[in-house]
Image: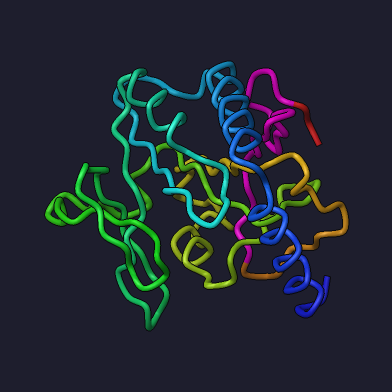
Amino acid sequence: MKASARDKTRREMRRRRRELGAQARKLAARAVCRRLNSARLLRPGMRVGAYLAVNGELDTAPLIRLARRHGCRVFVPVIRSHRVSSMWFLPLSAALQNNRFATPEPVSGHEQRISPRFLDLVLVPVVAFGVAGERLGSGAGYYDRAFSYLRTRRSWRKPLLVGVAYHWQLVPSLKAEAWDVPLAAVITDNEIRSFTPSIPGARGR
């Protein structure tokens, strides 16, 4: 998929997200939450990264509550540098403020920030995804840069990157770019698609 085609896909998927009704959003988020629970990926003491949904993204609030019920610590991304598109993860707190992309970030807790390498599981935002774990993100490159070391997996194998999406965000023709970091799985309101052999109840590629 050429750059112009990827941009077209982004525009189309964002439009569909914006047009989705509130009840449909709520039902999809609940369905994804049930599937995450059935996958048995959450264990006490895990460090779980999760985005805070904006602009029609699939709501992660039920997933965050589920992770906390399982005894997990929840961290959210915070932009470290806009110039080089890098980010840290901070513990999720009640006090939030919007960054330059209108995405909520914790106001406090910066002394507890951690590198993406020290997370166990990350629920990743998805604009579109492909049949082999390809991910089309917002285009800013923060996630691909933060987890670029996972492309080789020689010394670091964590975290497990799990995309969260509506089922209709699947694009069979989506092709990965050289810098794209593949997903281990995608959880949608309809199914779990696993691209590794270790996720129970998942449909393989």
Say which of 151 and 200 sits in front. 200
Say which of 138 and 178 sits in front. 138
Q: Residue 18, located in which quarter of the rendered image?
A: bottom right
Looking at the image, residue 105 sits to the left or right of residue 61; the answer is left
Is 34 included in the stretch rendered in magenta? no
Q: Point out residue 24 in the picture as x, y percentages from the top left corner.
A: 66, 35
Residue beneath the point at 72% across and 34% down: 193
What is the chief secondary structure element of the magenta stretch?
Answer: loop
Say which of 174 and 149 sits in front. 174
Highlighted range, magenta: 180-202
Report how many numbered discs are placed on residues in the image. Answer: 0
Tell me: residue 38, above or below residue 129.
above
Looking at the image, residue 97 sits to the left or right of residue 64; the answer is left
Residue beneath the point at 54% across and 57% down: 55
Tell me: residue 119, above or below residue 13.
above
Q: Point out residue 176 in the picture as x, y percentages from the top left corner.
A: 74, 63
Say which of 127 and 95 sits in front. 95
Residue beneath the point at 50% across and 42% down: 123
Tell me: residue 184, above or below residue 197.
below
Quadrant position of the C terminus in the picture: top right
Q: Residue 79, located in which quarter of the rendered image?
A: bottom left
